[in-house]
Amino acid sequence: EFPHACQVFRIESEVDVKTRDGAIKHRSEIHFGVTNLMRNRADRKRLLELVRGHWSIENKVHWVRDVTFDEDRSQIRTGNAPQMMAALRNLAISVLRMAGAKNIARATRHCAAHPHTAARLLGVRVAA
């Protein structure tokens, strides 16, 4: 039922996650994937690189949009507005990352409390 599938793969990983109370929670995860890349174009090592690249994007952008900006609960649903809001969220994340922010939620709260900082990051001059 997957006419273009060339490879199916399984990735097993061990993950340690720090909980809110500071404890370390250990879990094993198994992920499956399907690709249209032939083995001569994507061996085991290359497949792992591609998956890690995908998760890097997922963790740096999509997770931040989902959790920090609570994008899934947005009620903006008509016309071009959803795409425009996604672009603005991506812009905010990019500007904050370029400014050296490691924690986007903290940086967003800081900018909300200090609008001059946000304006400076965007290159906007604000009269005193």
Image: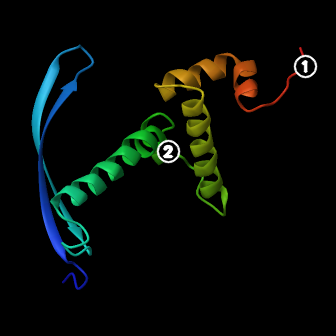
Front-lying residue, 118 or 20: 118
> Any mark on residue 71, and which?
2
Residue 28's x, y, as percent? 9, 40
Check disc 1: other Cα within 10 Å, few if <14, some if 14-19, many if 20+. few
- For image coordinates 64% across by 22% down, the residue present is 111
Q: Secondary structure at mark 2?
A: helix
- For image coordinates 60% across by 55% down, the residue present is 82
Asked whether disc 1 touches disc 2, contact meaning CB atoms under 8 Å apart, the reply is no
Residue type at mark 1 is Ala
- Position of the N terminus by quadrant: bottom left
**Relative to 102, is 1 above or below?**
below
Residue 30's x, y, as percent? 11, 50
**Relative to 52, is 25 above or below?**
above
Check disc 2: other Cα within 10 Å, few if <14, some if 14-19, many if 20+. some
Left or right of residue 42: residue 84: right
**Relative to 28, is 46 above or below?**
below
> Any mark on residue 127, and which?
1
Circle nearer the viewer, 1 or 2: 1
- Position of the C terminus by quadrant: top right
Q: Secondary structure at mark 1?
A: loop
Alpha carbon separation for disc pair 1 and 2: 33 Å
Residue 121's x, y, as percent? 70, 28
- For image coordinates 23% across by 14% down, the residue present is 22
Residue type at mark 2 is Glu
- Mark found first going from the N terminus, 1 or 2: 2
Q: Could you tell me how many numbered marks the image carries?
A: 2
Q: Residue 27 occupies which quadrant of the picture?
A: top left
